[in-house]
Image (cartoon, rainbow, N blue to C red):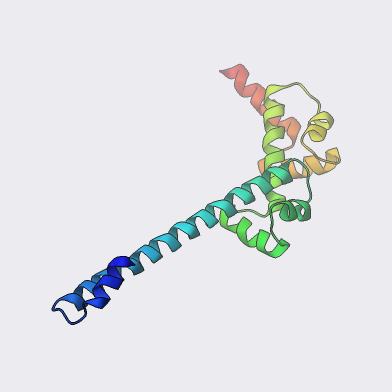
Amino acid sequence: MVELQQLLSQLNKPGTADRIDQVAVRIISEIIIRHIEKSEQNKNSRQLRIYSAANGLWAGKSLREVARENGFSIRSFYREWEKCFNVSPKNYVMNKRIEKAKQLLINTGLNNMEIARRCGFADTKYFYQWFQIHFSMSPQEFRKRIHNQNTMD
């Protein structure tokens, strides 16, 4: 700004207008750069809050609760969620639960009722339905296939 003030006081000297133009371009460029940096920081902050909300949903909190905790209205939460994930919040949680169930079926001898409970399903029937949707087979069939594959290896 000091440089600009000095140039303005010398307007009657040749070439001063060009130098003023150059200073103005630098100032405008600096403003744009700072605006972009601030926008990126806000974007990153929003993404971090959405990922925090995803963890809250996975931990069993309600959508309304995690939206409020992370400073979103329900509507803005959904808009930001869509920017980060390709599934709805409900399907995100279900996918996580099914993935955990899959790991428990592979790595433990737990029965389906216990697996459903550990993965956050209220009842075994609901667990079966979601598992069937994801893997086109029941949990028992899945475990049997994994067992057969392991014995063939």
Q: In the rendered view, tell whether residue 152 sits above or below residue 92.
A: above
Q: 149 or 48: nearer the eye?
A: 48
x then y, percent, for residue 41: 51, 54
x then y, percent, for residue 76: 66, 63
Q: Is residue 133 visible?
A: no
Q: 26 or 72: nearer the eye?
A: 26
* 53 left or right of 45 in image: right
Residue drawn at 68 percent across, 43 percent down: 55
Q: In the rendered view, tell whether residue 19 sits above or below residue 94.
A: below
* 13 left or right of 147 in image: left
Residue drawn at 82 percent across, 44 percent down: 126
x then y, percent, for residue 13: 15, 79
x then y, percent, for residue 138: 74, 37
* 115 left or right of 106 in image: right
Quarter in which the C terminus is drawn: top right
| Count of numbered labels shown in the rendering | 0
Q: 30 or 147: nearer the eye?
A: 30
Quarter in which the N terminus is drawn: bottom left
